[in-house]
Every structure is written in C-alpha cells, then in structure tokens.
Image: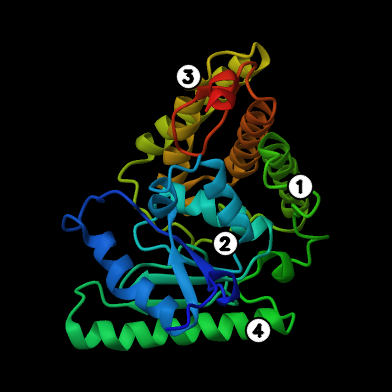
Amino acid sequence: MTKIDPSLKTKTQECFVIMPIADADGYDKGHFKKVYEDLYKVACEKAGFQAIRADDVKQTNLIHLDILQKLVSSPMAICDLSNRNPNVLFELGLRQAFDKPTVLVQEMGTPKIFDISPLRYYEYRKELRYREVLEDQEAISNAIMATKEASDNGEGVNSIISLLSLSSPASLKDITENDSAKMLQVVMSEMNELRADFKKLSKFSFDFAGNAGSYEINLPEQQTLSMELAKINAIYSTIKQLTSSMGKFEEVKKLYDEYQQIIARISPATVPKRYRERVFDIALEIDRLFSNYVAKGNGNYSWEMGSKIEPIDKQKSN
C-alpha cells in the first residue's frame, strides 16, 4: 500500500471560534460546549474549515500568546454574542481591529448588542433539538462560506473598519511567530491608534452619542447608575496611580476586569447626556493606560491573555 506523504496533504484553514468557554449563569452545565461541538465544529467542517477555540489551543500546551496570534490571524472566525460575555466582546474587538472576516451568531431571542444595521447576525435555537441543529448547522455553514466569498472579493462583511472608513486595519506582517513580546506591543499600539480614529468618527461602542439601543440592560434605580459611574471614576484614579508607579499586575488586572464588567452592565440610555462624554473619555483612558502598561511588560512580567502571569526568565527556561 502506497503511503501518502503528510506534507503533501492540503492543510485545512482554521476558523477561530470566539465564545464563552466556562459555564454561564442561566444555562445548563456544558451548554456552550454542546453548541461548539454540535453546531460550530460541524458547520465549519461543512464550509471547509477546521474549528478551533481557546481551550483547544490550551490543550496543546502553547502559551496564551498563541491564542492571540490565532485570534488576529485566522482566516475566518465565528463570534457567539449570546450572553454578552466581556471576554468575547474583548476578543471580537481585537479581531475587528485587524479587519478579519467574522461571522456573528447568537441564540434566538438575544437582543442586539450593537445597534448598527449593516452588521449581520445569524441566529440558532438554544434548545439544540436534532432537526433544528441540522438546519442551524447548514445556515451557519452557508454564512461562513458567504463571508469568505465576500472577503475574497474585498467586501467587508461585519467590518467596522469598512463601515466607518477608518484609515487602515492593524497588521502583524512584520512580526515573526517567535517575537511574542514585539507582537503584543504592536497589537496594543495598533489598537490605541484605531481607537483614536474610532473616537473621531463614531461613538457607537457604548452609544454615548445619544442613540439608545445598544446594551439593553435594565438598571433598576438611578442611584444604582450613580454608584456604577462612581466606581468607574474610582477605578480610573487607582489604575492611573498603579500604572504610573508600575504597581503589581494582579492589582491592575483585577481593577481592569471590574471596569469591563461595569461597562457591560451600563445601558447608555440611562446615562444623562451631560455625563456621556465624560464616561466615554474615561473608558478610553482606562483602556489606554492598561494597554500601555501591558505593552511595557510590567518590569519582569509579560501578559498572557486571561491567564496567570509568569516571569519572563521562567518562560525562557521552558
């Protein structure tokens, strides 16, 4: 029997799946794992891609910077917006910064997070009944193929870069795979640059321009909102102090995570107009401070996405 040289096999392109990994409140145990295995993996295979998500990368003992690499360089991605997971939104933001094709999906009944009509969403049934799963597999597979075809033709599907006519997407073309520190610095600096362009052209991220509709999350009392805004101010002051003195990464990261959770809870419609510009500016400044702090490596440390911090010396020894 003739053996086939593995090097001659056509390598299947990867589709990075951005979605909740851990069990989420309000869902059955293992729900999103079933969504990934029953819907996305099959849909990707039908469309000619190999599905991969963050926990698949972790199992190969690669450092989390490889997750970042796949996030911004995979030729295709699926992003599940079903439960407004802050990590999912952060990863989608990174993907958008590099203007890479992304299929947006969510379970039926999920309010739209972004009130921007050109963005296309594909919905699936969360009950995962057999016949519905087959139908949703086909629909998502078709969405992947349609997005790939549009991308190959130079048409931006779900592209914020194209929608707002921003100057240019971020790029890692001059960075080698082994130069992880430089890659992280480029990612952060490119995001800061795009964020500046983004602020000039639109404020739809948190919809502080006055158009209600994004993040339709109910805050019961005006007093609750006041407390949330006060927390953002306090976090900003503390992060500013810690980053200027190169404080402990764990403290800075904890504050930054808390800030992201608050932003995810706030409904722009509840923020008085006189405060919106201020809140938006503080949010941008917190992002900038954290990005610059991470890019500097925090002295002896490097940042791994959503993971523990390890001394650079220890990483080299591995």
Name the amino acid type tagged 2.
Answer: Asn
Q: Which residue is mark 2?
A: 211
Locate residue 33, reporting x and y percent: 27, 60
Comparing labels 4 and 3, the label whose residue is closer to the camera: 4
Disc with the residue nearer the chain's start (3 vs 2) = 2
Residue drawn at 44 percent across, 57 percent down: 215
Question: Between marks 3 and 1, how big is the CA–CA gap?
Answer: 30 Å
Residue 199 vs 78, above or below: the answer is above
Question: Between marks 2 and 1, how big is the CA–CA gap?
Answer: 39 Å
Question: Between marks 3 and 2, how big is the CA–CA gap?
Answer: 35 Å
Locate residue 133, reporting x and y percent: 26, 82
Q: Would you call the spot at circle 4 few (<14 residues within 10 Å), some (14-19), or many (20 or more)?
A: some
Front residue of 48 and 156? 48
Q: Which residue is mark 4?
A: 150
Name the amino acid type tagged 1.
Answer: Ile
Q: Would you call the spot at circle 1 few (<14 residues within 10 Å), some (14-19), or many (20 or more)?
A: some
The quadrant the N terminus occupies is bottom left
Residue 205 vs 79, above or below: the answer is above
> Total marks drawn?
4
Horizontal arrangement in the rendering, residue 248 relative to residue 298 (left or right): left
Q: Which residue is mark 1?
A: 175
